[in-house]
Image (cartoon, rainbow, N blue to C red):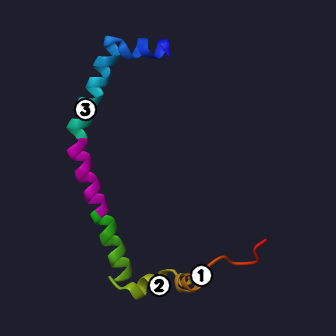
Amino acid sequence: MGTFNKVKGDPRVQEKAHQAADLAKEKAPVVKDKVAEAAGAATSKVKSATNGSPDTVDSLNPDRLKLQDQTGPQGTLP
């Protein structure tokens, strides 16, 4: 614990920590925009794959409806 506190309190470590925090604050808007773009692209891709129809989603996973009918545990319980 003493070594940790010694390293943590080192002015060089503090300077690098501040630099890292400043860089993260500077890049945050860019990352936010890229994430938003990727989410929008993924949404568009799913909508185009399903033609925006919930029925198409069922056709992508035919077991979906069957799984919905299976409620509760399956098999025998000890």
Q: Residues within 10 Å of mark 3 (few under 14, many from 20)?
A: few
Element under disc 1: loop
Q: What predominant SS class does the magenta segment belong to?
A: helix
Label 1, on which residue?
Answer: 71
* Nearest-to-viewer mark from 1 and 3: 1
* Nearest-to-viewer mark from 1 and 2: 1
The answer for how far apart the CA atoms under marks 1 and 3 are is 50 Å
Amino acid found under the numbered disc labelled 1: Thr
Nearer-the-camera pick, 24 or 8: 8
Label 2, on which residue?
Answer: 58
Q: Is residue 45 left or right of residue 66?
A: left
Amino acid found under the numbered disc labelled 3: Leu
Element under disc 2: helix
Question: Looking at the image, which residue is at 76% across and 77% down?
Answer: 76
- Report x, y in % for residue 34: 26, 52
The answer to which quarter of the image holds residue 19 is top left
Magenta stretch? 28-39
- Report x, y in % for residue 29: 20, 45
Q: Is residue 12 left or right of residue 25?
A: right
Q: Residues within 10 Å of mark 2 (few under 14, many from 20)?
A: few
Pick whichever of labels 1 and 3 is earlier in the sequence. Answer: 3
